[in-house]
Amino acid sequence: MKKLTNYLYYVVMIGLVVWFAYTKGWILANFESVTPKRAITMLENDHNVTLLDVRTVEEYKSGHLRDATLIPLSKLETNLDKLAPFKKRKILVYCRSGNRSVAASRILEKHGFVPINIQEGIIGLAGAGAQLTK
């Protein structure tokens, strides 16, 4: 019985590690992730980039990047038509800390978009010197 308990413990632990790595976009991600500094550089120099904020309306109102399109993650899949004009462009995706943007990037990639997840979200962007607008 003790061997079975040990076996189950390891299976559960491995499962948690895989789940965590998946939600962070470290594994099974068909999209790129960039640091906040790299994202700022891309916004300044690459005119083929669109910015998507997947936070809530309240979070967006508290401060967001200029020219960001707001589509909360919970409404993203039903509002992909709003992003249709940008289907051939890179879409920089951010949230508060980088978790929802991974989920959003998976949705976008599944529907033929070219998402780029911003690691650390708006917290990292603000820390890297990005200017926020209210």
Image (spheres, grey):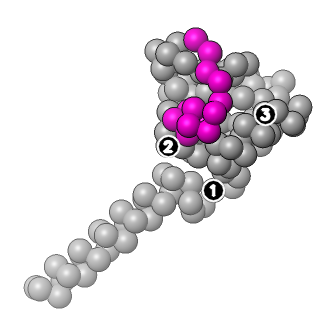
Q: Amino acid at mark 1?
A: Ala
For this view, does 4 lie left or right of residue 64? left
Q: The residue tagged with tag 1: helix, strand or loop? A: loop
Q: Is residue 52 visible?
A: yes
Which comes sooner in the sequence, label 2 or label 3? 3
Residue at the spot 64% in from the left edge and 42% down from the top edge: 36
Q: Which residue is mark 3?
A: 43
| Quarter placement of the N terminus | bottom left
Spot occupied by residue 12 in the image (x, y as percentages of width and height): 29, 68
Q: Which residue is mark 2?
A: 99
For this view, does 53 lie left or right of residue 88? left
Question: How busy is the neighbourhood of tag 2: few (under 14 within 10 Å), some, or many (20 plus)?
Answer: some
Which comes sooner in the sequence, label 2 or label 1? 1
| Above-or-below relation of 31 to 75 | below
Q: Amino acid at mark 2?
A: Asn
Residues at circles 2 and 3 in contact by the CB criterion of under 8 Å: no
**Magenta residue check for 125:** yes
Q: Residues under labels 3 and 1: Cα distance?
A: 22 Å
| Above-or-below relation of 28 to 119 | below
Magenta region: which residues?
A: 122-134
Residue at the spot 78% in from the left edge and 40% down from the top edge: 41
Residue at the spot 17% in from the left edge and 88% down from the top edge: 3
**Camera-nearest label, 2 or 3:** 3
**Tally of numbered discs:** 3
Which comes sooner in the sequence, label 3 or label 1? 1
Quadrant assignment, res 127: top right
| Above-or-below relation of 65 to 6 | above
Q: The residue tagged with tag 2: helix, strand or loop? A: loop
Q: Residues under labels 2 and 3: Cα distance?
A: 21 Å
Q: Which residue is mark 1?
A: 29
Q: Amino acid at mark 3?
A: Leu
Question: How busy is the neighbourhood of tag 3: few (under 14 within 10 Å), some, or many (20 plus)?
Answer: some
